[in-house]
Amino acid sequence: MPTGAGPEAVGIDIGGTKIAAGVVAEDGTVLDRTRVPTPPDDEAATLAALLAVVDELRAGNPRVEAIGVGAAGLVEWPGGHARWAPHNTYRRLELRRLLHERTGLPTTVDNDANAAAWAEARFGTGAGGGDLVLVNVGTGVGGGLVLDGRLYHGEHGFAGELGHLIVDPHGDLCACGNHGCLEAMASGSTLGRLGREAAAADPGGRLAALAAEAGGQVSGEVVFAAATEGDKAALALFERVGHWLGVGIASLVTIFDPDLVVVGGGVAATGELLLAPARASFERYVHGRVHRDLPPVVPARLGPDAGFVGAATLALARG
């Protein structure tokens, strides 16, 4: 098992479909890890799952001295109230207080993409310093801003909801209720939905065939598999999703002028299928293109560990 330097904390990343967690040292070393499904039913089940994860990890790691949580959606900072998330059941869940009371450990709760941005800025692609914008493309689209060496939270902790930047007011309906959010146009859920539409329109095509092999469901993974085979319909879907991702990145760069844009999340693991059209669209729409140097748009380095690594090290930094 790897050994890290300094104190240790449990980091937890609550996503729309899974809870990823680990024990992390102050230097970002992952010492232990676990993963469970996100309960689909209610807040009590979510809290119970979190406590079970903490108990499991503490049992094998007696040096743990804090808990850090990254939760999807609107998370009040520094109070740690998970107020609302389109893909999760909690509503005004006082995560920080409840976890502290049940475990006795100092607890920090932030937005999940903020935590991932912190991890990438300290231990990943942004470890060299400078301002960083993270766009996390998974089931939805999250984001985080590390400016002047600190996470930018805004007045109430709600800053950085980059997935709900509206890129097309006449676009698709988002789970948040608005139309044309970046999440509605460029997420893993969007890729799967577009794939299902394409498969239905061409039942003899490769997307439909791969979906049948996978049990009948067209997911983002199925679209990726078809694209890697060179299927034109699947490649066109990546071009479409990447285009809208680039539109969003262009707006973010125009506003924040960062040194680096990092694209993370499960969909980003598709690599250049997503990033190449995103970069092209970004360069087309960013303000003052011919008069400025553009920041690199690069894949995240820490992969699925970024959320819980960031949450744990934020907790240690606050302790």
Image (spheres, helix red, strand yellow):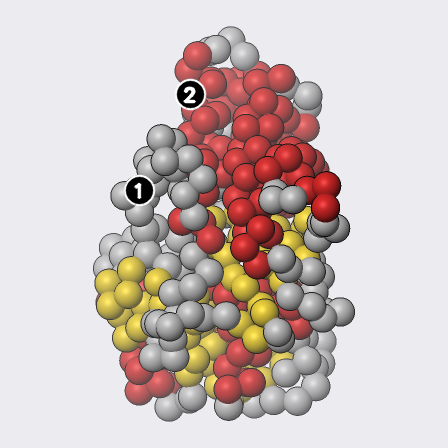
Q: Which residue is mark 1?
A: 178
Percent position (x, y) of residue 95? Answer: 32, 74
Q: Residue at x 47, y 53 (%)?
A: 162
Q: Which mark is residue 144?
A: none
Percent position (x, y) of residue 227? Answer: 63, 26
Q: Residue at x 64, y 35 (%)?
A: 284
Secondary structure beneath label 2:
helix
Q: Residue at x 34, y 79 (%)?
A: 79
Q: Nearer the viewer, residue 252 or 56?
A: 252
Quarter holding the N terminus is: bottom right
Amino acid tagged 1: Asn
Mark 1 vs 2, N-terminal side: 1
Q: For this view, does 5 lie left or right of residue 20?
A: right
> Number of labelled discs?
2
Q: For this view, does 95 lie left or right of residue 222?
A: left
Q: Residue at x 54, y 28 (%)?
A: 240
**Is residue 303 at least partly visible in the picture?**
no
Q: Which residue is mark 2?
A: 197
**Corner quadrant of residue 15:** bottom left
